[in-house]
Image: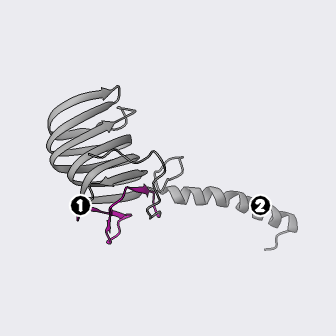
Amino acid sequence: MRLSATALALALGALALALPALSAAADRGPGAGSQPAQADGTLTVRSANGVLTLSGRGSVIGQIVGKARLVIEDPDPVDGIPVVSGHERTQRQGRNSVLYTGNDLRFRVLGGQFRLRLVGNGISLSFVGRGTVVMAPLGTFDDGSYSLDGGDTYRDFGAGTAVIAVTAGVTGQPSVPSGLAPDRP
């Protein structure tokens, strides 16, 4: 079978137009709808001591051992309802913000956008999504460690404030921009 030059050019043009759409569909995966996939990262924190602030979109589950304070800001209460157990007291901080205090707080926020501020010893959590973590350790011998993107290697928070971006494939600890460091406990 022989194609004319015009038919060949039309076929190649149609293929060139179809490739970006096929590539985008492959990136989304089956049943993903019409939105392009965003690459979520993961963060695991073990036994952190001090103040940890997590701002992001995704899901988080964790606990603070011992005396603890937890503030959850949820700008859209419909997209993911926070669940906290172990609190002895709650106090509304604003329209979309609640302070929980108690011993051995356990919490989860599944889906949506949120901001958490955790104060205490023994902060452990797992986060899947995109966001930023600011950690101000107490400055003791062992103020905890973290791992990004499912890595087996845990890094110490160190003595100074750490800012960590959580996005798939992004690892690192950029310097703290002025005004971003959380308050000390």
- What residue does disc 2 label? 13
Please tell me whether residue 150 belongs to the stretch shown in magenta.
Answer: yes
Residue range corresponding to the magenta coloring:
140-169
Task: Assign the N terminus to one quadrant of the image.
Answer: bottom right
The disc at residue 127 is none
The disc at residue 140 is 1
Query: Mark 1, residues whose alpha carbon is within 10 Å: few (<14), some, or many (≥20)?
Result: few
Residue at the spot 31% in from the left edge and 50% down from the top edge: 52
> What amino acid type is highlighted by mark number 2?
Gly
Up-down relation of residue 185 to residue 41 (above or below): above
Q: Which of marks 1 and 2 is in front?
A: 1
Residue 95 shown left or right of residue 100 in the figure: right
Q: Position of residue 158 (x, y in %)?
A: 33, 63
Label the magenta part by its dominant secondary structure: loop
Query: Mark 2, residues whose alpha carbon is within 10 Å: few (<14), some, or many (≥20)?
Result: few
Residue 117 shown left or right of residue 177 in the figure: left
Residue at the spot 23% in from the left edge and 39% down from the top edge: 83
Q: Position of residue 2 (x, y in %)?
A: 82, 73
> Which residue is situated farthest in the bottom direction here?
1
